């Protein structure tokens, strides 16, 4: 019997690898650090992992027992990989939607499913759906060419093309600057342009992918609302966090978001729970938000997998985003998402000029015995995410300083 | 260059597996749950594991990437395994001491080293050393045969054969009952007999292993003092815990030990730190203690590896015993051992009559979203340790009840 045919729930577990052990096997597509940390969180749960990785050196491939090296863009590879898995989940959104539908047609549970995941894969589909369910977003529309971008900018300038959120965002002469995004394939600032004129708007169209134009929101800060939802509809919400980006890459996350108005925090959590329900998301959903100067929250991006804005939960919450993602895709009851400390701070460790971080890592451990370091086993390249640090405590300034110092020292930008 | 020849410290890391990644590789001998949880704790540290396991189905072999199947009693197997490892450590004490000396002679760091580990392997050597350094133990001596056991009992009865601890333990007519232990190979109550007469004392001598006789200590409870020590001499002490045994097997651990007199707690911690220093232990040292009715602490057993009495640290301490063991054997600075909650309770999950725990596991998650379950991926056999649960909080009664209920439900002894 094809293991994928077995229903994945507590009463009919499927795993068949270890003798006697009937706990299910999770098939993880993608060998990055999200897969690595999901595997780490699955070990105490007694859940076995099977990994589909591009290379044996990928972050997760170094620490998972059963690793298949292959291309997730190839359906036959995915089908072969899925044998012996009770459910398939992902550490990225790049698996072609049609392949996911094919796996489902084979009877293999895919979580999140293709109908949900497409909203994290295609920004055009995502915006259309959020408009349809009345979730406030930046004003936006698909544009055909630079001239169309200028037309969209005019609409913004005239305060037209209102989003369902009602009240318009910042008005500018001619509506520029405008944000342009290819609807597929972008991440960490890639596939995103901010243009000040039609003349600057040529490049995004070169890829031949549909381009989404959005107003450049006048925000005071970025927030993230992270929730986890299971197939039987149970959902939990983590506290809303502040996410600070540097050059389009997440740099610092503070949990909970300092000084966030309770009503706004509640609205953001309800918005994320509503999106998870309406889009039938299974697993972890990250909703990246803009907090506008005029007191609104607008949805920036969606991610349907464990997310950088949730890394703080590994040391700062009762149940981590990774453990809850595993529990969700297996339709297990979800764990308590509440924080364990008044403040938890995550700072990403980016590669610097020194290829070997080991001695810096040793220094950081000696300086701060409470520091929680998470290294991904990745080659150090300038600007590349190679790990993160978590700190927690009662005093936000202290917690922030400790995390920033450690991350800066590991990168080599702080030397004392 | 033989990787074992490289000094293991932060300034000369040795790992050579991932491209560019220079973090060291830890060779773990033994594929049990201690190895599994040590690997789990090594993932965020970016430390790579190589595992020597008896079978591919062993607890740790299911979750580690690089697994060598072989017999730890065979020196050639150990030598081959050690290639590419920067340090060798263990999840049990059963590797022959002479093999460890041979590996050291090859230039491979073995931590803890054979000269330390022998004290955890041979109870006779351990008692002699603790006597020599003035650590209070139950009165004891090596006995030759049942008649010699009777002679030892007489000495106890006459209050003779004082241990360096001075004040004698409980006096009994003829000194029986007497505890007999084979000096090697015992664990979880195996290799231990309590005899009430010379007639009952025949069996321990059948194994042909030297037998240690000890007074049966009149204790109020058992405690454990857990410490971690690194090669450069840094050491940390976890709070002293109460350990409750059932049929010679650890059942419940409460951290910290409720109502323990501060002076006695401090004495126990200092005793454990002193033993680690005097025996040159590297890594985690568990010192199992008797708290006597007359207010002393006597050393029962030593374990030089992560220990069941330290499993609570995975969810209850800032740094777990496993993470600190990894940091110690690599001579990295140690992490903060302090507790994160007022009370943490660990209860072992033993196998019951039902081979499949998955539905019970699901029920426990649903009943207590704060429960921390740790499953080892082992076949369920009656009485076998297959996992543990941790709970923590402010109210000891509540924390105890939650942990006991979950463990009992998983075993099948509690059904509502």
Image (spheres, coloured by chain):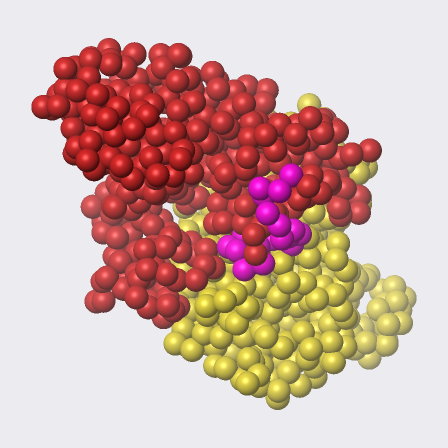
Chain colours: A yellow, B red
Residue span colored magenta: B56-75
The quarter of the image holding the C terminus of chain B is bottom left
* Most foreground residue, B211 or B130: B211
**x and y, in percent, of residue A224 in the image:** 55, 58
**x and y, in percent, of residue B192 in the image:** 30, 38
**x and y, in percent, of residue A407 in the image:** 65, 37
Secondary structure predominantly adopted by residues drawn in magenta: loop
Q: At x 54% / y 49%, what residue is drawn?
A: B31
* B402 to the left or right of B122: left
* Most foreground residue, B163 or A136: B163
Is B59 magenta? The answer is yes
Q: Can residue B96 be seen here?
A: yes
| Count of labels in the image | 0
* Most foreground residue, B134 or A203: B134
Q: To which quarter of the image does residue A184 belong?
A: bottom right
Q: To which quarter of the image does residue B208 belong?
A: top left
Q: Is residue A316 above or below residue B287?
A: below
Q: At x 71% / y 43%, what residue is drawn?
A: B80
Q: At x 66% / y 86%, what residue is drawn?
A: A102
Q: Residue furthest left?
A: B173
Q: At x 26% / y 53%, what residue is drawn?
A: B404
* A411 to the left or right of B291: right
């Amino acid at each position: 019997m094809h293991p994928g045919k077995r229903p994945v729930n507590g009463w009919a577990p499927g795993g068949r690898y270890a003798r006697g052990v009937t706990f299910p096997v999770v098939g993880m597509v993608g060998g990055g650090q999200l897969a690595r940390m999901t595997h780490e969180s699955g070990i105490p749960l007694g859940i076995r992992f099977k990994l589909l990785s591009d290379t044996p050196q990928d972050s997760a491939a170094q620490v998972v027992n059963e690793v298949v090296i292959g291309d997730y863009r190839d359906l036959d590879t995915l089908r072969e990989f899925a044998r012996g898995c009770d459910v398939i989940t992902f550490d990225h959104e790049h698996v072609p939607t049609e392949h996911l539908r094919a796996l489902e047609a084979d009877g293999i549970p895919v979580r999140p499913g293709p109908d949900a995941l497409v909203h994290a894969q295609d920004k055009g589909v995502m915006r259309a759906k959020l408009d349809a369910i009345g979730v406030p977003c930046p004003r936006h529309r698909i544009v055909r060419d630079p001239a169309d971008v200028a037309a969209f900018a005019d609409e913004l300038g005239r305060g037209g093309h209102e989003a369902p959120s009602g009240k318009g965002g910042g008005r500018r002469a001619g509506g520029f600057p405008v944000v342009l995004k290819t609807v597929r394939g972008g991440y960490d600032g890639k596939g995103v342009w901010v243009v000040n004129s039609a003349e600057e708007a040529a490049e995004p169209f070169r890829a031949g992918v549909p381009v989404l134009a959005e107003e450049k929101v006048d925000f005071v800060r970025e927030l993230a609302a992270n929730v986890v939802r299971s197939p039987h509809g149970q959902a939990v919400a983590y506290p809303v966090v502040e996410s600070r980006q540097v050059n389009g890459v997440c740099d610092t996350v503070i949990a909970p978001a300092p000084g966030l108005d309770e009503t706004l925090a509640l609205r953001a959590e309800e918005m994320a729970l509503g999106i998870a329900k309406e889009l039938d998301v299974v697993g972890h959903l990250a909703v990246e938000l803009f907090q506008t100067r005029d007191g609104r929250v607008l949805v920036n991006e969606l991610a349907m997998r464990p997310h950088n804005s949730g890394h703080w939960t590994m040391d700062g919450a009762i149940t981590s985003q990774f453990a809850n993602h595993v529990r969700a895709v297996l339709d297990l009851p979800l764990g308590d998402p509440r924080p364990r400390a008044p403040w938890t701070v995550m700072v990403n460790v980016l590669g610097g000029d020194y290829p070997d971080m080991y001695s810096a890592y040793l220094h950081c451990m000696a300086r701060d015995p409470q520091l929680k370091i998470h290294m991904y086993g990745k080659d150090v390249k300038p600007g590349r995410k190679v790990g993160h640090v978590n700190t927690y405590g009662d005093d936000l300034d202290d917690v922030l300083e400790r995390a920033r110092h450690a991350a800066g020292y590991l990168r080599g930008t702080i030397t004392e």
